Structures are given as C-alpha cells and as structure tokens.
Amino acid sequence: MRISCTVNGEPQQADDVWAGESLLYLLRERLGFPGSKNACEQGECGSCTVYLDGVLACACLVAAGQAQGRAVRTVEGLADGGELSAIQQAFLDAGAVQCGFCTPGLLVAAHDLIERYAVPADAEIREALAGNLCRCTGYEKILEGVRLAAARRADPAGRR
Amino acid sequence: MSAGRAGQGPVLTVPVRPRPRPGGVPGSEAGAGARDEGIGANAGRPDGIPKVRGEFQYASDLWLDGMIWGVTLRSPHPYARIRSLDIGPALATPGVSAVLTHEDVPGRKHYGLEIVDQPVLAVDTVRYQGEPVALVAADHPEIARQAAKKIVVDYEVLEPVTDARTALGHRAWDGAADGGAAGEVPRLHPDGNLVRHLKLRKGDPAPVADVVVTGEYHVGMQDQAFLGPESGLAAPAEDGGVELYVATQWLHVDQRQICGALGLPPDKVRLTLAGVGGAFGGREDLSMHVHACLLALHTGKPVKMVYNREESFFGHVHRHPAVMRFEHGARRDGTLVYVKAQIYLDGGAYASSTPAVVGNAGTMGIGPYVVPNVQVDAYGAYTNNPPCGAMRGFGSVQAAFAYEAQMDRLAGTLGLDPVELRCRNAMTQGSQAPTGQVIDSPAPVEEMLRRVAALPMPPAAAWANGGAGAVDLRDLPGGVANTTHGEGVVRGVGYAVAYKNVAFSEGFDDYSTARVRLEVLGGEPVATVHTAAAEVGQGLVTVEQQIARTELGVHQVTVHPKDTAVGSAGSSSASRQTYVTGGAVKAACERVREGALAVIQRRLGRSVPDLRLAGGKVISDTEGVVGELAALLGNEVIDETVEWRHRPTYPVDPETGQGFAHVQYAFAAHRAVVDVDTELGLLKVVALDCVQDVGKAINPQAVVGQIQGGSAQGMGLAVMEEIQIAGGKIRNPSFTDYLIPTILDIPPMQIEVLEYPDPHAPYGLRGVGEPPTISSGPAIVAAVRAATGLPLNQIPVRPEHITGTG
C-alpha cells in the first residue's frame, strides 16, 4: 500500500508498504528517519517514542497504515534547524547521554513533559519517563537534564 | 575555525542513507566541546550533538544501496543431534538470495575468545537453545524470517545438562573430586565439562577460629540488556575481502575470529565500529559478525543483520549464574582468621570468557579484606544452559554477594556493627591479597566505608510515625498500585564494598595502540587521534580528546573513526580503556610533542630547554610565550603510532593461585536504604549512595555517570533481573518479562568521588566502570536483611523470599 503522512512538518510518501510493517519500520527503513530506535519493538522500552498528531506514541506499536494522513514528529524534528531545543541542550549539559540509544525516545517524552508542566516535580518527571528504559545512566542525569531544561525555560535570562 | 566545529565529530565513515533534513548543520555552534577542555574537565562528548539530534549512526541504522537482510535460524532445543537439514523449501522462496549452513563456512568451523569451541553454525550437535543453525538472506527481513521457518531440521532431542555441579559430577559440597561421578553425565565437549578450576591456597590449611559462620548463596543469570540490539552490515569488497560495520567491544579480536571462519587474511577482513548502543560485556563475543560476512561474500551484496529483542537474549552471552558456599572464621574481636569458599559458575554451552571469569571470581573471591588463611575453589562448567561470559563486574559480582553476606552474618554473630567489622578487616596499601600479591597503590577501603556511612540519610518515611495523610503512594513499595499506605513496611540500611581487578590479568599481553597526528589546518593546530578502542557509550572518545588537548596544548582534536586500519586497542571491558588506551594516547601524544618541539627549536634556530605546548602556544617558563604553535609548526605534520602496555602481570600458580595476577585493583563502597512491605514482599530502594576512589577523574561528570549507571545494574540483579531457565530453555526473553530498573525504581544517588593516585597508572587514574556494579546489589540485600531479619541467600530477591511463601 501507499502511505502518505508528514514527518517533522514535511510531506512524505512510501510505496509498497507491507501491511505488517510498523510506523517505526516505515520511519527507519522507508522514509530515512532512523533517529527513533528499535530496542524492543514491543512497547516496553520507549526508544521509538514519537509524537503522532501531537500525542506520544511508541512507533513500534503503531501500524504503518495508521499513520496515513497524520503528522509524525520524531527526535529529528526537535531541533530548530541548527539550534538544539532546550531539552536536547540540557541532556548534553547534564551528561544524560551515554550510549544514547534511549536518548531519542527520552527526549521526545521529556520534550512533551516540559511542554505540559512548566517546572515538573521529580515525581512528575519519574512518572512521565517511566516508559523509557535507559541502561547506561541510572537515570540520575536524565532527571538533572529535565530539571535543567525546565529551569532554563522558566527563567531564560537566568545564569544556569 | 569556529568553536562549533571543534565540538563536532568523530565523523563516522559508515554507510548511511541520505535523509531528509530540515536545514542547518548538525553540531554547529551548540555547546559541548566549545571550551578548552583537557583532563579533569567535564568536557562534552564529541558524539553528543549527533546523539541528541537522532543523527548518530548506530549499527542498526546502517544502509547501503542494494542491501539485503540476513536472519538466523536457531535451535529450539538445548541439546540435540542434527540428523538432517533441508534448506530446499527456504531457498525456493521468492525474494530469498541465500540459505547457508555449516557446509558453507569456508575456513575454521569453530571460534571462541579463549577456547575455540563454538560452531559458526551448528555442525551435527546443538548445545543450547538458540544456537545458530542456518542463515537466510532476502530482500525484506520478513521474507527472510518466513523463509527460515521453512528450513526443515530433523533433531534427535537429548536430555540437557542444566546444573554446573551436576555437569562436573560434584553432588555434595565436600564430596567427590573433579569428574568423580561424571560417568552418568554426558561429556558436552571432548575434554569434558570442566572449563577451569582455580585453586587458591594461602596460609594454614587447617585454621582454627573462635567464631565460624557458613552460608550457601545463589546468584541468578543476568542479562546485559544493552538497548541497541546486535547489528551490523557486511559489504563484499572488490579485492575478494569484506568490510564489516558492526557494534562491538573489541574490533581486533572479532577480526581474528572472522578471518579464521572465512579463511581470509586480516587485510581482507576490515572492520569499522558502527554506533554502539551499550555493551556491558555482551558484545565481547561474536554474534552476527561472521554470519553477515558469509552472506555478503556468498551473495555479492551488502547484507544487514539486526536482531530483535527476543533474538538478542539468545544472541549474546550472559552473566554466569553462581552457586557458592562460604565459611568465614574470625576471632571474637572480629579479626578474620580464614575464609574457605567453593564457587561454581555455570558457563553454559560454550566457554566464551569463562576461564577469566573463574580467575576473577577466585582471586577476588573474599573481597577487599586481609585474611591470613584462604582456601578458594572456583569452577567454571559446561552445561546446556545459555552460554555465559563477560558482564560488568565479571566474576567479582557473584563472589561479592556471598562474601558481603558473610561479613554481615559474622557481624551479627559477634554483635558488631557491619561497618566496624569491615573496617577492622579492610585492606590498605601494602596489604597482601589472597594471591600473595601486595596491594601497591592506595586502597582506601576504610575511608570509603566511613565516608559513605557519613553521607546524609534520606528523610524518615512519612508513615513511620503512624502519621496519616502525608503519604505519597509513589514513595511506597508497590507505588501507585496502592498496595500499602505504610502498614507492614519496614526500613533497613545495608553496606557493601566492591573489589575488582582493572584490565586484563594473569599474564595476558594487554596493550593498546594509538596513532596521533598534529598538523595545522585552516590556520589552527589540530590533533587527530586514531585508535581501535570501542566507544560503547562510556565516553572514551571524550577521554581521548581530553588527553590530546592536555598533552599537545591544542583545543581541536578529531577522533578518527574506530577501525582495524590501526593496531588493536584491546577490549572495552575490564574497566581498562581509560587506563590502557588512555595510556597509549598519552604516550603517542608525548612522542608527537617531542617531534613538534624539535621542529620548533629548529625553526627558532636555538635550543630552549623548557619548551612546552599550552593553549595553542609554545611556551617557555623562562622566556614566556615563544610563539603560536600554528605559526611555528607551519606545514610540518607530526604523526606517531605507539603500542603501549601496562606493567606485566603473571599467571597464577596452578596449585596455589599465588602470583602477581592483576595490574590494578579498584574499590567502591555502597550504602543502601530500603523500605520493605513484609506482607507482600515488595520493596522500594529509597537511597543508594556510593563512594569510589578513581585515582584521577579524567572527566568527573562521566565518572559519576558510570558510578550511577553501574549502581543501577547491580541493583537490577539484586531485586529484579533474572533470565529464568527451565530445562535449559529461557522463559523470559523480552523486556516484558525480563525487567530492568526504570526511572521509578532507581532512587536518588549521592556519589562521592575520591582521587588517590595510583603511581603505576597514567595520570594516577583507576578503572571506574565495574566496581559500582559489584557493591550496590549486596548493599541493597543487606538493607533488606536488616529490615526483615531474613537470611536472603539468593539474588534476585523475590517477593516470596520475603513473605516466606516461595
């Protein structure tokens, strides 16, 4: 089948998509957006987290056909051109990136969190990111990254 | 040259698909690496910007025009003979380009890290569930998977050997010698089922003590659970060779094994490291490496292989499960008199790194304590369980669970505080290890324990005083499952210490190779560092840049892609890369600096004795700034390659285990605070604090990240992670059923880093990665014991162990 959708604001189209393919496969193997990651492909690890019409979803659990006519936003769409988004910069500054395989999904989920809560409490951060596994960091620096991004947004002139 | 450019790269030369890009240059301007960041600084990762942009090329992201997909058919049985194998129906499937079996392996049919015993593809016997039997390549991964199901394998199923002591014929703890009753047990390999027996004998063979405590301990099989599954891309080359882009820990040991299997010389098998999504020991052995090369050479097309999570559980070795019996004898004041231990490690179907794991479990087996009389027997056995090999902590993790439980048991028997008992027996610099080796660098075990004990405790539980109302379910065992509001919940505090050798031991020729080039590009001095050391997430690429910046006084350092065009760096394991490859980069930089200074003196036309390089300038302490490095170097290119070794270690005596076995020791101390719901057996780790001596923190932020991440993996083994095996079969090969800690499970961690330099190591540094994984779990179990009074001799601790219902 043919699938048309937008990815990060740009129209995309793929032909000969097999009915069993996931949105993750469509993004990674057919449309050239491998940023979303394939760590478990059963919705447990969150590495493939994307926005689907503005709502978080595990791309591995969404059939490719379900993306027809919809808007997908991936980790590749978080930065504004050459400028990193606040959450991307904060992850780097906090040391929240090691191997980085969980990073794309965590960034999308954390991006969504700080859009919803200006300054999330730790308990809110933990709850929001509970679906994203990280094996390298022990999560402490991921918490720091989210706190840092939220604080910078709340006080852009601050010297943090 | 803009600061942004300096923050960029390594520029991976791996095949990638051109992709839509909204505009802008990746890595330009943004943050990390934009300051002058040598050793000791929190320098940003050179791969950080691509990683947060989703543009870093992991092995599973590789793509080449015309590439096809490879899949592996695996044995469903833990032990069986293959009577016949029919690939016809699979080969006839439209879209399939190749179906290969062991008959298509042109070179050596077996491989292995230390012992060559593992078939590239099963020959006539399968020895574990998941053993590769055949390969399929097709246009689409699903076509390949469907075709693989059409391969007809006729198995004669055999009764698997599933217990290490049974495999060795050791039925009773104090019973038969090696192989005593092995008559009834199948010999899984020609030389029998014993992979290694390490004997440690020190002091009085029949020691007597005032107080004796004994215990039997069980450690479950842990999975590395790196997030990036095994992946790679093999492309046939015009010279008849093959290019392999792969996620791995040690390119050259892969190359050696691939060359053997393909029957090709090293110059025809060229490896480049693709982006690695974590490793933790699980990528030390081959996975899809040879398979993808075979398919590529057979079809003449690039072949990509990507395991899914289920296959990943079958596709790499795990942490050895252990059964151990320990006996500690002490004087009434708590001074240890002797330790006797028997340690059984289940190596599974193939040897992998079992010999070295046995060596570590034995020589590290009694912990960082001074004990005059020691008798340890550590065994590694072949069984039909999944193969086990390297995982962070490598033998020390298993032993630490037992020796730290014993220390608490001894403290309890003597009525001593657990920290005091440990401090009373703690190693210091100058202590003798059970191998007879004298610890010849700082060993601040007591200080670490006292410091971790002095860290602030978490606030008391809101429900502890019977106070209602203020309870947040998220702070309780069971969380928002609403299983308790504090009723039946008790708190405990526990301590443990880690003890680990750094780098490869027992006489292994452990070296790394670094090539460093210094030149002027665009008016700026630029250094390029080329090593084959695998960046697996730990941040070695950052360390390489930091060392070159410090040694050459330049800001801009490019990390060359990791490949086999330069000599071996050894493995990214054993907490060794910052030490060994760091040492090699430092040595190569020193030689480059000598060359550069010789050029500069020539240009100056005179000798200045105290010239050095700093901040892009050539400086003399007596004359001040002599000039700009770029101007004085001109168009000279200084290029040096150095093979660097740490001081040698030696094999241990086969009868006594005595010898200078290890180049360096590392230590960490943990304190855990745990709340336990005694009615349901649920627990919540409230705090997990650590003090670790790292000699010198080359990158303090990365060091803390290693300690936190390592602590989390140790916690996983203590409370939730176990590959469950029944009859040799894995029952939980998924992240749905094999649980690793989430951000809800992991508590806040206070980390204190000590820097007592090791005079034998570059910059005085000490390996960092493994110690925290060793002591965090034992500290947590100690806390659960303190809270409940239960013995808890098995990890992971399960709810039924706490409720007494299992």
Image (cartoon, coloured by chain):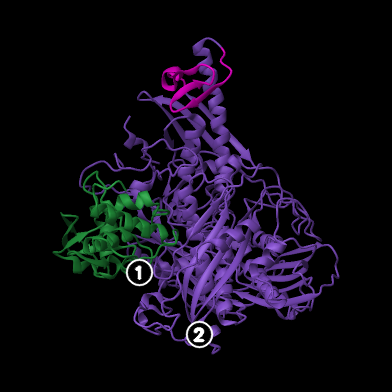
Q: Residues within 10 Å of mark 1 (few under 14, many from 20)?
A: some
Residue A74 pos. (x, y %): 25, 57
Residue B302 pos. (x, y %): 39, 51
Hue used for the chain lettered A: green
Check disc 2 and report the residue beneath it: B678
* Labels 2, 1: front one: 2
Q: In this picture, which residue range is highlighted in magenta?
A: B607-636
Residue B390 or residue A149, whichever sits in front: A149
Judge whether A86 appears above or below B158 on screen: above
Q: Which mark is residue A130?
A: 1
Q: Is residue B694 magenta?
A: no
- Label 2 vs label 1: CA separation? 25 Å
Residue B123 or residue B553, whichever sits in front: B553
Q: Is residue B752 left or right of residue B663?
A: left
Residue farthest toward the top in the current orientation of the protein: B605
Residue B679 pos. (x, y %): 48, 88
What type is the residue that disc 2 sits on? Thr
Tell me which chain the residue with mark 2 is part of.
B
